[in-house]
Amino acid sequence: MKYYPVYLDIQNRKCLVVGGGSVGTRKVKSLVNCGAAVTVISLTLTRELAAMAESGIISAEKRPFQPGDLDGAFLVIGATSDVEQNKKISKEAGRLNIMCNIADFPEACSFILPSVLGRGDLMIAISTSGKSPAFAKKLRKDFEKQFGEEYAVFLDLMGAVRQTLLKEQHEPEAHKPLFEKLIEAGLPEMIRADKKDAINAVLLEVLGSGYTFNELLNPGKGSAK
């Protein structure tokens, strides 16, 4: 099986999770973090899910899954320990052409979920195509040591530089060499070490005057160190 890697925009889309245990809780949290409109269907809920439902972060219905629950759904995740119910979810999702993931049952899935490392807008997704989730998890932990929170700040900085350059009156293609120089300058390491003087020196050398770390990330608040 060859899976097609893709990142989905699920902002405000209806996503259904069937199962309110620990696995369902993890799935719900990842969907909520990406802005989905999440509904959980389960006879029981973890305390965390119950609190999320009480606060209106998600919708929850304490009952068994019914075929009509998929009406209008963008995707569904089955996270129950009931094999027959999981098969029912998968079958109904296939009939409606709705993307479906069944936890620990790749044969019933139309998509699988990778192990993900997130650092702000940096997302590193690792998949073994379902062959060894444990190895994918191990690789994620290895990457966690290599990519710290400084990469989230680095991407915020690069995004701010990009937006500023796009306001200038020349072709975006002209920006490519500038970004390559910034990437090669080792800015993440400088951010991790809190070397703002060194960062500002790189910005000055590559971009010219008017670009400082603080001003780019906090526009209008000055360039004080």
Image (cartoon, rainbow, N blue to C red):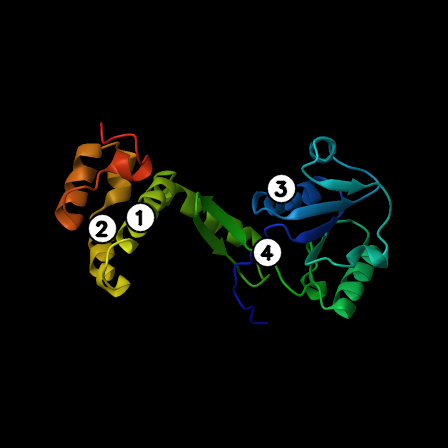
Position of 33 with respect to 51 (left or right) is left
**Could you tell me how far apart the alpha carbons at marks 4 and 1 are, in whole angstroms?**
28 Å
Give whichever of discs 3 and 4 has the lower sequence position: 3
**In this view, the mark in front (1 or 2):** 1
What is the quadrant of the C terminus in the image?
A: top left
Q: Nearer the viewer, residue 164 or 129?
A: 164
Give the SS element for disc 2.
Answer: helix
Based on the displayed image, in which of its 4 quarters is residue 132 positioned? bottom right
Give the SS element for disc 1.
Answer: helix
Residue type at the position of mark 4: Leu
Q: Is residue 48 above or below residue 69?
A: above
Q: Is residue 1 above or below residue 57?
A: below
Give whichever of discs 2 and 4 has the lower sequence position: 4
Disc 2 crowd rating (10 Å Cα; few below 14, some 14-19, many 20+) is some
Q: Which residue is mark 3?
A: 29
Q: Which residue is mark 1?
A: 158
Position of 170 with respect to 110 (left or right) is left
Question: In the displayed image of the protein, which residue is found farthest to the front?
Answer: 169
**In this view, the mark in front (3 or 4):** 3
